Every structure is written in structure tokens, then in C-alpha cells.
Image (cartoon, rainbow, N blue to C red):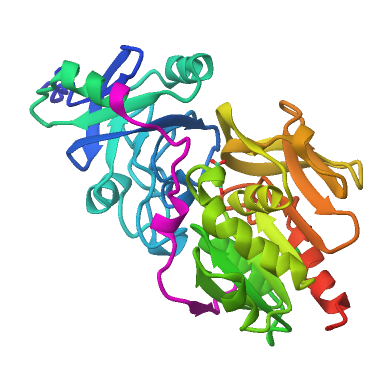
């Protein structure tokens, strides 16, 4: 008997604002969504990527073809719910084959209300993203295969994009809370800290859980505050240091609340550490500018040069905006640069333990070369002589 043939009728389509259409097979939720399209080159960690709040407003193209092979497990969620708008893959998601899997990816995508499209020539699509610069797209999934292409194209063209969008406020927690979970494995062995030594206030602009775990494992007692917390609210908790999280959207659109809060914290002379959106916000508060990139950096294999050590760190990245290094004011040192395009990847105040990086030292997913930054932060807090 012949094996059942898959229906040739496409059940999903991806419409780029320039009019290019990709047809494929839908999985996960049905319906349609409009977003910016980016690509991620990581070989693993699709669940962490899909649940990273920094991907709000973006559909992610996975350039690695084996997506779905480790299934999903709640332990790997980087936030409470799927936040990337959708996913594009080359093959239909692979069946899970992993002892940690509690569900398969397609079922999880349905539960999360996220649309997936498989059967796409992701190499061709990635080239289009590089050429067009992160295009606006409409992604639709209909099991009957009925698509109103003109309407989808119009939606992609009408979408206002991420520039000027403040999404951090939307994905942030609304109430403050304490974080107490450790990493299950520390890069140099297992987490050893039992009693937290440093009181840290972490501003949640869309914080990934592994960042909070990394802080806790480095010896921080972490209190998380909503994105719009003021400097007074931060300082009222009497922290030893302040952490600025990653998050989605345009950093410049958060200036109304993030910049005055950071300026207030800097005036209190506390150690400050920022990651990704937190890095961009710190740069803005110090007087620098941020700009939109052509297609951003999204992957787990990006080489970054650390100017202080001369070493190249392989890093995890996810950003579509960047700090304009030409705009860094006097007193702010560029500490790291991307070896892909020379863009800024880190800053530090010359005379204070205030520093931030554009990439993701929490490595979720990704390499752990830059984990030392969490220790640099705790060392700065340990060295601090309270006023
Ligand atoms: N991961 C992040 O924090 C991303 C920061 C910002 N939304 C950007 O795209 O550049």
C-alpha cells in the first residue's frame, strides 16, 4: 500500500511587504499576524527564543532545519508565555526525541496561540531579509488554504513597524516580586551560592528568566520591579546594585520613563549592569544615541571582541537596534565590539562600576564565554563602600 501523500495545497503563507510570497504548511495556531521578520542562526534553543520577550512583534525564521527535535518543556520557558509573533522553518517540525520533552512543538505553538509555517526555503528567505532589511510581513495559517493575498499584503504594508514602539512596558511585570531560582548548572560546575550576598533591584523591561537565574546564582538577592518604576522606588529598596534587563521594541521609545530612572540611579553612585535593551537604555541615559540596524543580530555564534582582555567571546545575540558608538560621550568607554560588523557591543563608565553589554551572557540559548560579567557585577557590589 502506498503511504498517504501530503496534500499539495499550502495551508500557510508569508507575505512580505515588497510583494514576495512564500507558501508552506501551517502548524500551531490558525489565523494571521503582522510583524517584523528576522532570522536566528542558533542550532538549538528554539523554545527559549520563542519565549524571549525581546522577540515581541517579530516573526522568527530559523535557519537551522531541525526545529522541534527536543520538544518543549516548561522549564525552558524564558517567560510566562510565547512572545515571538510566529515562526518560520524549513521542514515541518521534527517529532520530539528527548527525555525532558513534555509536549511537542506544534501542540505547544497551538497552546501559545502562535502561528508556524514549515516547508519554506529559509536560505532564500534569509537572503531576502538581509537584502530588504528586516521586512514587515503578514503570516497566515488556514487549514483550508484560503488566503486573501491582497489583504495580507496591505496589512504588511500598513504595519507601523518596531521603530518608535515602546513594547517593554507591555511585556513587563506589573507587580514587583522576588526571584529565587538558581541555574541548574553554573559554567564552572554547579551553583554554589547558598546565601545571597548582594541586594539587587532588576528592572523588568522583558527580562529573560535565565538572566535572573544567573544573577541569583552569582549571589544576588533579586527583587524585580516593573519597567516604569522610578528611581525613588528603586532606591527605596536600598539595593547594592541595579540591573537593567533585555526587552523588546525601540529603546528610544522608552526614554520617558527609563532615562530619568537610570539618571537617578547613576546619581546614587550604585553599581549598574545592563543587558541588551538595558545596555541601550543606559547608553541613552548617558547621552548616546541608538539606531535601527538593517537586519539585526540574532544567533548563538556571534564573535565579540573584549577590548580590555583582547579576547574574542562567542556570544548569543538578539537585537535589531544598536548603540551608535560615534555618539558615546566623553567618559564612556566602548568595551566590546562585534567582529561581524564593528557595531558597539559594550560600554563602561571610566570611573564607576557602571557597565552594560549588547549581547546575552546568560546564554539561553548559547555559549557561556561571557558569564564572567555576572561575577564582575557581584565583585563591584562587594567592593562598594556604602555612602
Ligand atoms: N534582546 C533585547 O533586549 C533587544 C533590545 C531591542 N529591542 C533591540 O531589538 O535591539
- The answer to whether residue 184 shows anywhere in this view is no
Q: Which residues are magenta?
A: 157-184
Residue 61 visible in the displayed image: yes
Residue drawn 37% across the image and 26% down it? 136
Quadrant of the image for the C terminus?
A: bottom right
Instruction: Find residue 158 and report its horizontal and vertical position in percent.
Output: 29, 25
Ligand 1 quadrant in view: top right
Instruction: Relative to 381, say whether 111 is above or below.
Output: above
Query: Horizontally, is 385 left or right of 7 in the view?
Result: right
Q: Find residue 365 and report its horizontal and vertical position in percent.
A: 56, 49
Q: Nearer the viewer, residue 97 or 36?
A: 36
Q: Residue at x 79, y 61 (%)?
A: 354
Residue 162 included in the magenta stretch of the image:
yes
- The reply, left or right, for residue 123 in relation to residue 193 is left
- Majority secondary structure of the magenta segment? loop
What's the residue at 22%, 48% (across, down)? 110
Quarter of the image holding residue 119?
Answer: top left
Residue 214, horizontal then vertical, whole percent: 64, 66
Q: Image quadrant of residue 84?
A: top left
Count of numbered tags: 0
Q: Is residue 245 above or below residue 10?
A: below
Give the quadrant of the N terminus: top left
- Indicate yes or no whether the magenta region holds residue 192: no
In the image, residue 28 above or below residue 128? below
Give the quadrant of residue 100: bottom left
Residue at x-position 61% and y-position 64%: 261
The residue positioned farthest toward the bottom in the image shown: 195
Amino acid at each position: 500500500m502506498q503511504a498517504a501523500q501530503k496534500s499539495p495545497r499550502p495551508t500557510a503563507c508569508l507575505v512580505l511587504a515588497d510583494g514576495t510570497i512564500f507558501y508552506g504548511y501551517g502548524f500551531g495556531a490558525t489565523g494571521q499576524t503582522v510583524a517584523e521578520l528576522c532570522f536566528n542562526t542558533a542550532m538549538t534553543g528554539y523554545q527559549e527564543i520563542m519565549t524571549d520577550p525581546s522577540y515581541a512583534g517579530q516573526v522568527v525564521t530559523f535557519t537551522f532545519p531541525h526545529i522541534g527535535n527536543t520538544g518543549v518543556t516548561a522549564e525552558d520557558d524564558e517567560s510566562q508565555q510565547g512572545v515571538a509573533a510566529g515562526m518560520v522553518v524549513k521542514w515541518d517540525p521534527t517529532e520530539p526525541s528527548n527525555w525532558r520533552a513534555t509536549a511537542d512543538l506544534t501542540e505547544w505553538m497551538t497552546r501559545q496561540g502562535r502561528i508556524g509555517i514549515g516547508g519554506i526555503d529559509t536560505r532564500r528567505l534569509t537572503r531576502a531579509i538581509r537584502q530588504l532589511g528586516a521586512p514587515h510581513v503578514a503570516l497566515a495559517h488556514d487549514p483550508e488554504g484560503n488566503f486573501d493575498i491582497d489583504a495580507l499584503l496591505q496589512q504588511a504594508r500598513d504595519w507601523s513597524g518596531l521603530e518608535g514602539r515602546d513594547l517593554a512596558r507591555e511585556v513587563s511585570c506589573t507587580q514587583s516580586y522576588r526571584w529565587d531560582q538558581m541555574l541548574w548548572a553554573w559554567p564552572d560546575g554547579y551553583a554554589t551560592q547558598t546565601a545571597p550576598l548582594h541586594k539587587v533591584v532588576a528592572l523588568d523591561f522583558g527580562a529573560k528568566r535565565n538572566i535572573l537565574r544567573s544573577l541569583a546564582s552569582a549571589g544576588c538577592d533579586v527583587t524585580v520591579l516593573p519597567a516604569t518604576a522610578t528611581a525613588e522606588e528603586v532606591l527605596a529598596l536600598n539595593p547594592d546594585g541595579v540591573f537593567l534587563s533585555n526587552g523588546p521594541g525601540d529603546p528610544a521609545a522608552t526614554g520617558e520613563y527609563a532615562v530619568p530612572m537610570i539618571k537617578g540611579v547613576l546619581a546614587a553612585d550604585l553599581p549598574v549592569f545592563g543587558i541588551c535593551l538595558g545596555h541601550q537604555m543606559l547608553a541613552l541615559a548617558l547621552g548616546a544615541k541608538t539606531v535601527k540596524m538593517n537586519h539585526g543580530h540574532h544567533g548563538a555564534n556571534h564573535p565579540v571582541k573584549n577590548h580590555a582582555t583582547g579576547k574574542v567571546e562567542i556570544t548569543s545575540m538578539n537585537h535589531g537596534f544598536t548603540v551608535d558608538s560615534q555618539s558615546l560621550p566623553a567618559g564612556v568607554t566602548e568595551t566590546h565590539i562585534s567582529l561581524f560588523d564593528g557595531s558597539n557591543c559594550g560600554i563602561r563608565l571610566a570611573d564607576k562600576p557602571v557597565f552594560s553589554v549588547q549581547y546575552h551572557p546568560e546564554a539561553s540559548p548559547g555559549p557561556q564565554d561571557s558569564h564572567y560579567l555576572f561575577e564582575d557585577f557581584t565583585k563591584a557590589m562587594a567592593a562598594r563602600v556604602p555612602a
